[in-house]
Amino acid sequence: MASSVNRNGSDKLQKVFLYLILLNLLLLAVISLNMNTLRFSNGVIILMMMFTYNYFLAQLCYIRAARSQDAYLIYPVVIGALSSFFLVVYFFLLH
């Protein structure tokens, strides 16, 4: 049986999660701007770390977005994961 979650004020863990989402988008922007100057080995390492970061962010999103009011967390995480995938495809196919 599911229990209802009542929160008074803002949740500090929720704020940290939102900052992690913003950091993900910032990292994707920096990597996409510097993609052409990366050597292949450095690019592979960076892109694997981004995939790992996006995987853990998706797992946290699955845990944190349990309520129907938290659905706004899903969209930036999915956008970040898709952007990371397209960066990998671009790097491996066109680099």
Image (cartoon, helix red, strand yellow):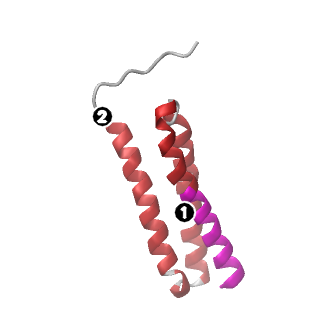
Looking at the rendered structure, the number of numbered marks drawn on it comes to 2
Residue 5 percent location from the top left of the image: 43, 21
Q: Is 94 or 5 nearer to us in this picture?
A: 5
Front one among 49 and 32: 32
Q: Which secondary structure, mark 2?
A: loop
User: Per the image, is 23 magenta?
Assistant: no
Nearer mark to the viewer, of 2 and 1: 2
Instruction: Report if residue 85 lies within the magenta region.
Output: yes
Residue 68's place in the image compared with 81, above or below, is above
The C terminus lies in which quarter of the figure? bottom right
Q: Amino acid at mark 2?
A: Ser
State the CA–CA distance, disc 2 to disc 1: 30 Å
Which element is circle 1 on?
A: helix
The numbered mark at residue 71 is: none
Q: Residues within 10 Å of mark 1 (few under 14, many from 20)?
A: few
Dominant secondary structure of the residues highlighted in magenta in the image: helix
What's the amino acid at mark 1? Met
Q: Which residues are magenta?
A: 79-95
Residue at 48% x, 80% y is 33
Judge whether 85 appears above or below 41 on screen.
above
Q: What residue sits right under mark 1 in the picture?
A: 49
Indicate the quadrant containing the N terminus: top left, top right, bottom left or bottom right: top right
Name the residue rendered at 56%, 47% in the picture: 58
What residue is disc 2 on?
Answer: 10
Tell which residue pokes out farthest to the right in this image.
Answer: 93
Q: Work out whether residue 44 can be spotted.
A: yes
